[in-house]
């Protein structure tokens, strides 16, 4: 048993310049590859511009649309493997809020990357629009994970 109490260290990522949102800033950081933050910003802001055009050139409504899509993709339950008596069971567990948001971002980005389209901002905007309406690759991944948790509900008594 550990003698020290585990410290929960979370680094503050700040807020983005345009929307004043920490979720958008975290999303930019996840999209960023090899330290190219300006490219990641242009991808996210380009996608938000496309969302804004769909709702009438309004940044607040575009941010609301982004948050709605984000909430559609975020999973509430997932399965975790647990070894009990020599066999491994997939046990459904509630997803903590921090992991929920990181999974939603990761799934949205990966679903946008496999889409067909001209550039990443258009693919990301299309994925976010589909997520708002309850379809798309990221929402499909969420429903697949939750269906797996529902199928393994009989093993939930092993979650202690």
Image (tube, rainbow, N blue to C red):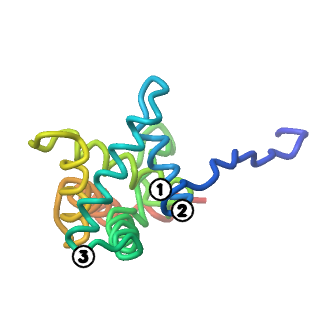
**For residue 64, what is the image quadrant?**
bottom left
Q: Nearer the viewer, residue 5 or 120?
A: 120
Residue 131 in the image, given as x and y percentages of width and height: 24, 65
Indicate the secondary structure of the residue bearing disc 2: loop
Give neighbour class at mark 2: few <14, some 14-19, many 20+ (Cα, 10 Å): few
Indicate the secondary structure of the residue bearing disc 1: helix
**For residue 96, what is the image quadrant?**
bottom right
Total labels drawn: 3
Query: What is the spatial separation of the Cα atoms under label 2 and label 3, in whole angstroms?
Result: 19 Å
Q: Are marks 1 and 2 in contact (CB under 8 Å)?
A: yes
> Does 99 sit left or right of 14 as displayed?
left
Residue 31 in the image, given as x and y percentages of width and height: 40, 39
Q: Which residue occupies the extreme right position in the image?
A: 3
- Which label number is shown at residue 55? 3
Mark earlier in primary sequence (1, 3): 1
Q: Nearer the viewer, residue 7 or 146?
A: 7
* Residue located beneath label 1 in the image: 24
Query: What is the spatial separation of the Cα atoms under label 1 and label 3, in whole angstroms?
Result: 18 Å
Task: Using the image, determine if residue 64 lies above or below residue 110.
Answer: below
Residue 56 in the image, given as x and y percentages of width and height: 24, 76
- Which label number is shown at residue 21? 2
């Amino acid at each position: 048993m550990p003698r020290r109490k585990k410290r929960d260290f979370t680094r503050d990522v700040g807020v983005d310049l345009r929307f004043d949102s920490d979720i958008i800033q975290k999303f930019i950081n996840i999209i960023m590859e090899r330290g190219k933050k300006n490219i990641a910003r242009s991808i996210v802001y380009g996608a938000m511009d496309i969302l804004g055009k769909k709702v009438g050139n309004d940044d607040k409504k575009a941010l609301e649309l982004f948050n709605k899509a984000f909430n559609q993709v975020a999973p509430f339950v997932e399965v975790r493997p647990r070894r009990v008596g020599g066999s491994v069971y997939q046990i459904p567990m509630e997803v903590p809020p921090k992991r929920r948001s990181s999974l939603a971002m990761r799934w949205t980005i990966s679903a946008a990357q496999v889409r067909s389209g001209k550039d990443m901002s258009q693919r990301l905007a299309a994925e976010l629009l589909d997520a708002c309406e309850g379809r798309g690759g990221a929402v499909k991944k969420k429903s697949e994970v939750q269906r797996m948790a529902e199928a393994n509900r009989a093993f939930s008594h092993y979650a202690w």
